[in-house]
Amino acid sequence: MPELPEMEAWRRQLNEPVRAFPIATAGPAHVATLKTFDPPLSALEGRRLAGARRRAKRLLFPTDDGELVLLVHLMTAGRLRYLRAGEKGPKAPAFRLEFEGGAQLVLTEAGSKKRAGVWLLTPEAAEQELAHLGPEALGLGPDALAAICAQESRRLHSLLRDQRVIAGIGRAWANEILHHARLSPFALSRDLVPDEVSRLADAIDIELGRGLELRERGANDARTYRVHDKLDEPCYVCGSPIARVDYEEHTVYYCPDCQTGGRVLKDRRMSRLLR
Ligand SMILES: [Zn+2]
């Protein structure tokens, strides 16, 4: 699933082009993709978008008159593309906006499951839709993170991925961040000493910043990630093979030497015993 760096790179790419022309035609949208019916999509026609915004892993396209917000959540397999006038697009996108002059914004989704969503909302309804999200991960800082860690005792990998607590991090960047911070994915948040909290806060900014920079240059997953999905490849810090353990239906990648004091986490039951 695209996370904060991926979504922010797309937002920056889309911000200028989406506001260049008013919307000529809104839709069609796949019945499973469009999550709202009032206001109707046609309410967008004739209006101009103010640009692209982002909150956590969602993209928001407010109209420049301040009356409507188009909200897009790509989930795992959704992709949003801006096509210039005349550029060939997919035959049956899950959602399409056509601008005056012929450029298009199209949402496609690989696979048969339609999980990506599009909402057309008033600004008040959009705010409500996003109200459950925690603070943005990028720029969170050590003080806010210390308060979050003290609130409840949670495994760090699970805490970082919880959008209600910190918004924008998923399993891939949780792996990268915890490795950078030299912390076990299964350490408990309340057990962190202040130095570890500030290391984690730094790692969040450094890793998400690194990801954003690479994604803006078009880097693929293999080049962007250094720990995530790198089983048995040498750790970029110490050279030990990266290990993997299944946890809460997620696969966690980590370096035993850098993060768990050399201990290899065998399975979920054992991983509960280790921090
Ligand atoms: Zn290492």
Image: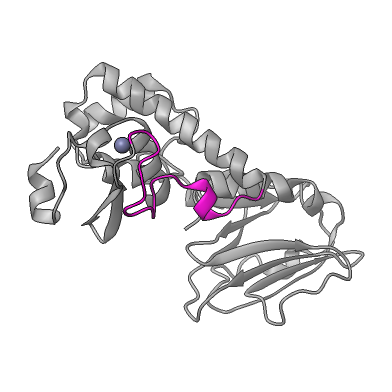
Q: Position of residue 122 (x, y in %)?
A: 62, 53
Q: Position of residue 254 (x, y in %)?
A: 29, 44
Whether 224 is among the magenta residues is yes
| 71 sits left or right of 52 in the view | left
Whether 180 is among the magenta residues is no
Main secondary-structure element of the magenta-colored stretch: loop
Q: Position of residue 80 (x, y in %)?
A: 65, 62
Say if 77 sits above or below 177 in the image. Answer: below
Q: Quadrant of residue 217?
A: top right
Does residue 148 show up?
Answer: yes
Q: Quadrant of residue 12?
A: top right
Q: What count of labels does the image hold? A: 0
| 84 sits left or right of 43 in the view | right
Does residue 124 show up?
Answer: no
Ligand 1 - quadrant of the structure image:
top left
Q: Position of residue 45 (x, y in %)?
A: 80, 65
- The magenta-colored residue range is 218-238
| 5 sits left or right of 150 in the view | right
Q: Quadrant of the C terminus?
A: top left
Q: Which residue is drawn at the image coordinates 75% and 61% (left, top)? A: 82
Say if 115 sits above or below 212 in the image. Answer: below
| 95 sits left or right of 163 in the view | right
